[in-house]
Image (cartoon, rainbow, N blue to C red):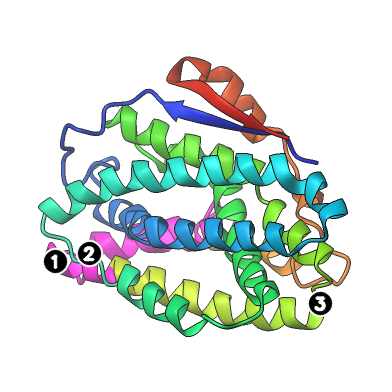
């Protein structure tokens, strides 16, 4: 099983930050802000799904997952709190979060579905966050150094997403989840994710009258499709999920471990699951 450590991040998010905190770049700032806007609602859904999945296991299997789920919940709850503080600053800057509202409506529509469906959705989203996390850990330069506390926050979050990427997937498999439904939800979540992140990013840019500026579109093209573009570099790991024999551990790297070791002074350990 995966050893999951719960960490308290030692940064001050009470103080506001500048509007274009990510190297003065409106697109890269708006894109990451959009992702953050989805996290509190999404991560609560992931927590609830994994907890329900654990309860649905037979007692003999439940013990195998108990400590890992505890660590998963601790990490995601910490992410939820930190991004809630971060999003509070975005709200005060005048941004409107429409992604969270759409996510809440979709979650409401899922009520009554068997727990494996919730876990399949969670595993799909966790795959997206894991491959984005690997991208950030491999290319930390896409986050500017003007706001060190925010860069630390994003890299810490990425490191922990990489750590717990297998939890929901393993619970889905343990409960007899099949490849067919895993794929159905994955394709739907792919559509939701792409539309939601682009829609919220565009709304953020529209708010600042940056949406139709040349430099915004140039930055978007470079960030998404350039030589080290996010879409270009995450396409293969995204596709790998579609294999019937896929497991998240197949995409392991040591980037998460290396970042956490190199930045141990930025957090304290408050709990551990195994």
Label placed on residue 207? 1
User: Where does label 2 land, which residue?
Assistant: 204
Left or right of 206, for residue 189:
right
Q: Which of 219 and 72 is in front in this view?
A: 72
Name the residue at the top extreme.
265
Q: Which residue is drawn at 25% across and 59% down?
A: 215
Badge 1, how many Cα within 10 Å: few under 14, some, many 20+? some
Q: Do the residues labelled 1 and 3 touch (CB within 8 Å)?
A: no
Left or right of 260, for residue 97:
left
Q: Which residue is drawn at 51% across and 29% down?
A: 7
3D distance between C-alphas at marks 1 and 2: 5 Å
User: Where does label 3 land, which residue?
Assistant: 179
If you read the primary sequence from the N terminus, does the residue marked by circle 2 or circle 3 appear first?
A: 3
Q: Is mark 2 on a helix, strand or loop?
A: helix
Residue 221 position, x and y percent, is 41, 63
**Total residue callouts:** 3
Residue 40 position, x and y percent, is 38, 56
Badge 3, how many Cα within 10 Å: few under 14, some, many 20+? some
Q: Do the residues labelled 1 and 2 touch (CB within 8 Å)?
A: yes
- Which residues are drawn in magenta? 202-230
Q: State whether the magenta stretch is mostly helix, strand or loop.
A: helix
Left or right of 40, for residue 245:
right
Name the residue at the front extreme.
59
3D distance between C-alphas at marks 1 and 3: 41 Å
Asked if the stretch drawn in magenta spans residue 220, the answer is yes
Q: Which residue is drawn at 56% across and 18% down?
A: 262
3D distance between C-alphas at marks 2 and 3: 37 Å
Which quadrant would residue 38 be assigned to in this image? Answer: bottom left
Q: What element carries label 3?
A: helix
Which quadrant would residue 59 be assigned to in this image? Answer: bottom right
Q: What element carries label 1?
A: helix
């Amino acid at each position: 099983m995966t050893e999951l450590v719960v960490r308290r991040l030692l940064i001050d998010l009470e103080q506001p930050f500048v509007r274009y905190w990510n190297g003065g770049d409106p697109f890269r700032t708006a894109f990451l802000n959009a992702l953050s806007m989805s996290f509190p609602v999404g991560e609560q859904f992931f927590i609830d799904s994994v907890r329900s999945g654990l309860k649905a296991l037979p007692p003999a299997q439940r013990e195998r997952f108990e400590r890992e789920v505890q660590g998963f919940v601790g990490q995601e709850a910490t992410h939820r709190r930190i991004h809630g503080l971060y999003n509070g600053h975005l709200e005060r800057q005048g941004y409107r979060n429409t992604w969270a509202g759409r996510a809440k409506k979709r979650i409401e529509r899922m009520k009554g579905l068997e727990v494996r469906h919730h876990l399949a959705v969670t595993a799909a989203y966790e795959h997206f966050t894991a491959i984005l996390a690997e991208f950030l850990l491999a290319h930390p330069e896409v986050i500017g150094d003007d706001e060190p506390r925010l860069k630390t926050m994003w890299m810490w979050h990425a490191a922990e997403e990489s750590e717990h990427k297998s939890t929901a997937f393993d619970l889905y498999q343990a409960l007899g989840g099949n490849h067919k439904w895993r794929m159905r939800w994955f394709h739907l979540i792919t559509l939701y994710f792409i539309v939601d992140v682009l829609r919220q990013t565009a709304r953020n840019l529209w708010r600042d009258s940056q949406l139709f500026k040349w430099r915004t579109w140039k930055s978007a093209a470079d960030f998404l499709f350039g030589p080290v573009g996010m879409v270009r570099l995450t396409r293969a790991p995204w596709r790998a999920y579609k294999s019937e024999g896929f497991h998240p551990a197949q995409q392991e790297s040591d980037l998460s471990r290396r970042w956490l070791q190199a930045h141990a002074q930025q957090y304290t350990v408050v709990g551990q699951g195994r």
